[in-house]
Every structure is written in C-alpha cells, then in structure tokens.
Image (cartoon, rainbow, N blue to C red):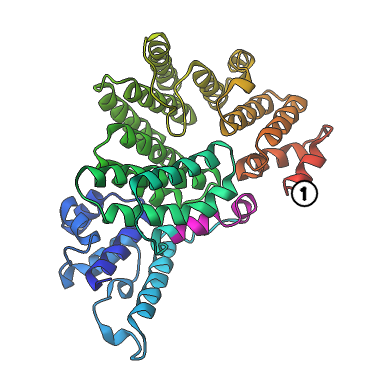
Amino acid sequence: MSRHRRLGTVIRAARCAQRMTQAQLGQACGYSASAISRVEAGLLRPAEESLPRIAQVLGISLDALDLGRPATLARDVTPDQEDAMLRRQLLVAGMAAAGTSMLPSTATAAAHPDASARIVGALYDPTESAPVSLQQLGLALASARTQFTAARYEDLGAALPGLLGTGEATRNALSGRAREEAHAAVARAWVLATELALKGHSEVAWPAADRALAAAQASGDPVVRGEAARVLAITMRRAGRPGAAVDFLRRTAGSLEQDRSDVAQAVAATLLLTGAYTAACGRRRADALDLMAGAEDAVDRLASADTRPPSPLFTVDATRAQADLYRIGVHTALGTPDEAVPYAARIVPDRLPTAERRARYGTDCARMWHHLGDHRRTVVALRFTEQVAPEEVRRPAVRALTADLLYAPVTVAGVRALAARTGVS
C-alpha cells in the first residue's frame, strides 16, 4: 500500500469516526469534496501545511497523518510489518476520534461478542481475499442475508469479514457493468454490517453505513442506494439527529418515486416508514403521521397493482403488515401507546416473513405494553421474542427493558428466569 493511500485511509477512518461528510471536511480545511475524495483514494496528497489543520479538524494527532517519513519506522521492519503497524495506528486514531465508542461496550459485547470488533477489522484491517465470480459473490451475499433475516447475528458477524473482503477483491478485479454489479453487492454487504452494528448499538454503524452508501452510489442502482440510505438515516437518528435523518429519507424517497418500477416504489415506501419512526423518536407527531400515511398509500398501491416486486426487498419489505408493525413503534415513540394497540392486534406474527421481523413485532409490543404499565403482557411479548429469535433478547436495548422489569416494584412471573437466560442478572 502506497504512503498516499495509507494517508487517505487514515483520513477516511477519522472522518467517519467524527461523522463528517467529505464536503464538511473539505470546507473546514479549504478543499472541495472531490479533492477530499481523491485524498482518501490515495490519488492526491494534501499540502504539508494543510496537515495540521486536517488533524485538528479530525481530532487526531499530527503524528497519525505524518506517514511520509520512513525514519519513523525501525530499520528492520518489513513492508508487511509496516502495513500492519500503520493499520494498528489507524485503528487507534479512529477510535480515539470517536472517544473509543467504536469499541464494544459491556452490554454490546454480551449481545454480540465479536460483532463490533469484526466490523472494525473489516473496515480498517480487511481480510486478504481472492476475487470470485459475480454468481459466487451473489450466493455468499444471499447466505449472509439469510443469517440476518433468521436473526442469527453471531453467524452473520463471523461471515461478514470474509464476505466484505471477497466483495472488495471481486469489485477491484472487474470493470464496466460487472464492476457496478459488484459495487451493489458490496453495498448490500455493508448494509448488513450496519444493521448488525445497529442491533448492538455500536458506533461502528457510522463508518459501515458510510461505506454502504459510497458503494451504492458507485453501483448506479437507485434501489441499492435507497437501501443504504435507510441504514445511514438510522445511524443519524441514533446519534441524536432525527430531523436531518427525516429530511434525508424524504429526499431519497422522492428520488426513488421518479422510478416507476415496483421495486423502487417499494424501497421508497420503506424509507417513508423509517422516516415516520424517526420523526416519532424526535416527537414530531405531525411529520410522523404524515410520513406513515404516505408510506401506507404507497404500500396500498403496490398491493393493488397487477405486478409484484420480483423478489423480497433486501432487509425490510413494503407490506401492510410491515406498515402496521411500524405503527406500533411510531405511536409508542410518540407517547401514545394506546393508539398502537389496535395495530398490534391485527398483525398475525406467524405471517411476518422472517424471524427478524417477528422478533421486531415482539420487542415493539413489549415496549408498547411496558409504556402502558402492563408488565405481564410485556413479559409475554419478550418471551415470544426469545422463542422466535433467541439472540434478539440479548440486544442491549431489550436487555435494558428486561432489567426495568426485574427491578420494578411489582414482580412478574417469569422475569427472573428471563433475566438469567439473557445475562441481565
């Protein structure tokens, strides 16, 4: 790896850790967004006098950017050892910029022992892989998607580094249309990595989502771009920026709506659903209900159409049951869980398409009943979630809900056993 490329990799890692766009970094340092993109790709080295400012903006030491002087390395260090040392420096710099938040917390580690660390490794110390055919890459991606939809998160975490490494190698070996298809596969692999990081409430979701969107944009596929935009918006909401996330989702959904294909319309509907929940988390009731109405209209149009999307969407489908499921979360987040009860009642959980979605139904119902003060039904919902997706109840957010029940003034049958099984007590 050239020194210019190593410098670009350091800058990209620190920028992602600071949750900055290329345009924001460029504006702060006197460069255009395209110039920052070229720097990160190793095609352009910033002027020496710019490095202190870049380091200051990124919140890292100047030493982390001073990769151009061989004298900083011992004489008996081989090129491979040098690369390993620099990757370790990069990882430390990126985590320092994020206040070490990219390291798994105790709660996250209990839910997914190695997931965050593996995603960090895939980001900054990728697995050496050989290219494969697009068909083989597609099969590997489909297998990873199956692990996610089946809520087998530990298996997914173990598979992701290899998938991402193979995807990158395959993409780099191709050109033209085949390269765009590989970009789309890489983007979807990073979408899965982001989804997994979000499940564990890990800050590594930010750089993973950034990688997903970059690859999606390079693919030229608006549907894949919409899928990546959705997970990026969720990371924005988790970081306390629901307003910006809603605006981003609206814009992306609007661009997809220009494409009249059923798949594009379905992805746009999922973005509106995510936007509705995001607005609800920001207590923007009017926006949340408006976005829900728009999503439900889109879902109804798809349901009444003569044609159907050729295959399920990548992580979330656009169906009436899905809209009802989002209604539960929206009304609970708005502080009106009583309005969610009718939507919960009309969902038949066994008809939800995947274990991950059935688990989402269970956890959303648990939150709804918890807000309504019905601890018994909260426990019933959590036990349903455990039955359909055992790893789901070990997520940090669900463990926190179990802890609330465990230490509530009124003890409910089954709580202590559930807490013991999920590591809460």
Magenta residues span 106-121
Query: Looking at the image, is 124 positioned above or below residue 199?
Result: below
Query: Dividing the image into 4 quarters, which one contains the N terminus?
Result: bottom left
Whole-percent x, y for residue 125 in the image: 41, 65
Q: Residue at x 37, y 44 (%)?
A: 135
Relative to 66, is 138 on the left or the right?
right
Residue 260 versus residue 326: which sits nearer the camera?
260
Q: Residue at x 35, y 37 (%)?
A: 229
User: Which residue position is annotated with label 1?
Assistant: 425
The answer to which image quadrant residue 37 occupies is bottom left
Amino acid type of the residue tagged 1 in the rendering? Ser
Relative to 389, is 80 on the left or the right?
left
Whole-percent x, y for residue 59 in the image: 35, 63
Whole-percent x, y for residue 352 in the image: 57, 23
Packing grade of label 1 (10 A; few <14, some 14-19, many >=20) is few
Query: Looking at the image, is 353 positioned above or below residue 386?
Result: above
- The number of discs equals 1
Whole-percent x, y for residue 100 in the image: 48, 61
The answer to which image quadrant residue 29 occupies is bottom left
Relative to 353, is 31 on the left or the right?
left
Query: Looking at the image, is 75 positioned above or below residue 413?
Result: below
Does residue 239 show up? no
Secondary element at tag 1: loop
Per the image, is 396 magenta?
no
Relative to 311, is 26 on the left or the right?
left
Query: Looking at the image, is 408 positioned above or below residue 171?
Result: above
Does residue 196 show up? yes
Q: Which residue is drawn at 45% across and 56% down?
A: 162
**Magenta region's main secondary structure?**
helix
